[in-house]
Image: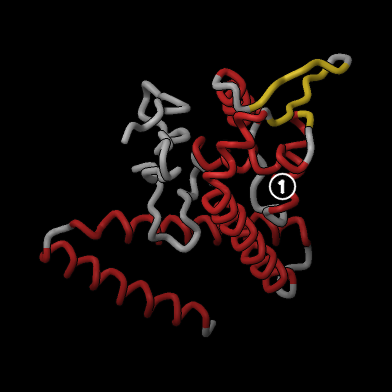
């Protein structure tokens, strides 16, 4: 059994699209994305380049798009939770084009992107993974909007509620990521983490009663 070469490579260790098993289409998950997390993404970046590439391929399978339109579509499917920056999105699209998974063509002053037959074949092996990422984005967006709805009842200005909701959701995601990273800690460290969790939980409950 021979695996195809990696679709993306990264000298800085950033997770890109992984190799695909030529017989079964299986992949190895990127090491820097904790699969055990409910949202499965580090809060500081929202999506790895690997996952953003999967989402882009899935969206381009439905219809071709300009880069800015792809950003709009990702923001919409995540209920406003995530919009990739141009500095994140366009390098990913460029790498997908280099690997023959998408094409980029000019229309006036803008480029639009569409899926190639090779990209369609790759997506057929990765559709479940792509849908999992999209589901995580949708879940995060729904949680963000639920937090916003709760906060706006106590804040006179909606413009203050959304930034606070985003910060709260990010803090929760960072906490989950930190707990995931602590799984290999020593028993002594785990006991200290347990005490921190117990103390933090009690303090949060006290603040909630204010």
Q: Residue at x 59, y 54 (%)?
A: 131
**Could you say whether the residue bearing mark 1 is in a helix, strand or loop?**
helix
With respect to residue 210, does 37 lie above or below? above
Residue 181, image x, y percentages: 29, 54
Residue 92, image x, y percentages: 57, 28
Q: Quadrant of residue 22?
A: top left
- Residue holding disc 1: 75
With respect to residue 85, does 46 lie above or below? below
Tell me the quadrant of the picture where the N terminus can be found.
Answer: top left
Q: Total marks drawn?
A: 1
Q: Residue at x 40, y 25 (%)?
A: 5
Tell me the quadrant of the picture where the C terminus can be found.
Answer: bottom right
With respect to residue 196, does 73 lie above or below? above
Nearest the camera: 179 or 16?
A: 16
Extreme right residue here? 108
Q: Residue at x 31, y 75 (%)?
A: 199
- Tell me: 4 left or right of 74: left
Q: Quadrant of residue 52?
A: top right
Q: Quadrant of residue 67?
A: top right
- Tell me: 10 left or right of 69: left
Circle 1 residues within 10 Å: few <14, some 14–19, many ≥20: some
Residue 209, image x, y percentages: 52, 85
Residue 192, image x, y percentages: 19, 67
């Amino acid at each position: 059994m021979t695996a195809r070469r990696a679709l993306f490579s990264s000298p800085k260790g950033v997770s890109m699209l992984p190799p695909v098993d030529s017989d079964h289409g299986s992949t190895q998950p990127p090491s820097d994305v904790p699969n055990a997390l409910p949202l499965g993404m580090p809060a500081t970046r929202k999506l790895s380049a690997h996952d953003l590439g999967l989402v882009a391929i899935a969206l381009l399978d439905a219809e071709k798009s300009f880069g800015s339109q792809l950003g709009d579509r990702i923001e919409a499917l995540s209920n406003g939770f995530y919009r990739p920056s141009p500095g994140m999105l366009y390098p990913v699209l460029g790498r997908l084009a280099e690997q023959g998974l998408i094409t980029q063509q000019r229309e006036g002053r803008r480029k639009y992107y569409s899926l190639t037959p090779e990209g369609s074949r790759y997506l057929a092996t990765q559709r479940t993974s792509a849908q999992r990422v999209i589901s995580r984005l949708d879940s995060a967006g729904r949680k963000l909007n639920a937090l916003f709805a709760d906060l706006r009842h106590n804040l006179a200005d909606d413009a203050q509620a959304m930034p606070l909701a985003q910060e709260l959701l990010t803090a929760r995601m960072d906490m989950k990521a930190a707990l995931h990273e602590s799984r290999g800690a020593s028993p002594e460290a785990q006991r200290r983490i347990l005490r921190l969790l117990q103390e933090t939980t009690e303090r949060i409950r006290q603040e909630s009663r204010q």
